[in-house]
Amino acid sequence: MQLQEQLKTESYVSETAFRSLKLEEDEFKSKLLQSEGIISSFKKQLENNDDDQLSNNKKNEQLQNTIKSLTDTMEPLNRTAQVVCEKQKQLQATIDGLTKREEALTQTVQLLCGQTKDVSTCK
């Protein structure tokens, strides 16, 4: 009898241990599935980040090309602007010289015409 009771007790303990192991196994499987889902989500996010980075790299390259093109265009324009500024200075110097010459000629005419203010009436 005692052997039977011991077997029943051992059987009960074994069943309890088996149920406990089964519950732990089920919980482990559930957590494993959750972890796989999280890992899959992270992988997808990394792929999206890689795609975004590639897109940003392409945009950056396009911007660099645009900047280079604009720089290449600006250099001759800057040279042209410098030439125009120099010519403007030369023209202003010529205008100033002609203005002084006209003033000198006007003074000469006024002296010759007897100090009239309106040189057009001088004959």
Image (cartoon, grey):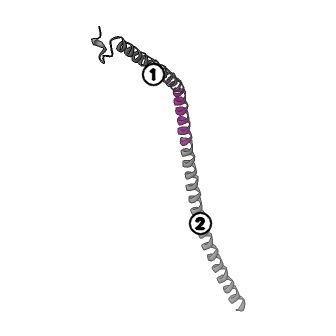
Q: Mark 2 is on which residue type?
A: Lys
Q: Which residues are magenta?
A: 56-77
Q: Position of residue 98 (x, y in %)?
A: 43, 16
Quadrant (top left, top right, bottom left, bottom right) of the N terminus: bottom right
- As drawn, is 19 to the left or to the right of 88? right
Residue at screen point 70% across, 88% down? 6
Callout 1 touching callout 2 (CB < 8 Å): no
Q: Which residue is mark 1?
A: 92
- Judged by depth in the image, the label closer to the viewer, 1 or 2, is 1
Q: Position of residue 95 (x, y in %)?
A: 43, 19
- Outermost residue toward the bottom in this view: 1
- Most prominent secondary structure in the magenta stretch? helix
Residue 64 vs residue 40, the one in the foreground: 64
Return the mark for residue 31. Answer: 2
Residue 62 vs residue 7, the one in the foreground: 62
- Outermost residue toward the top in this view: 123
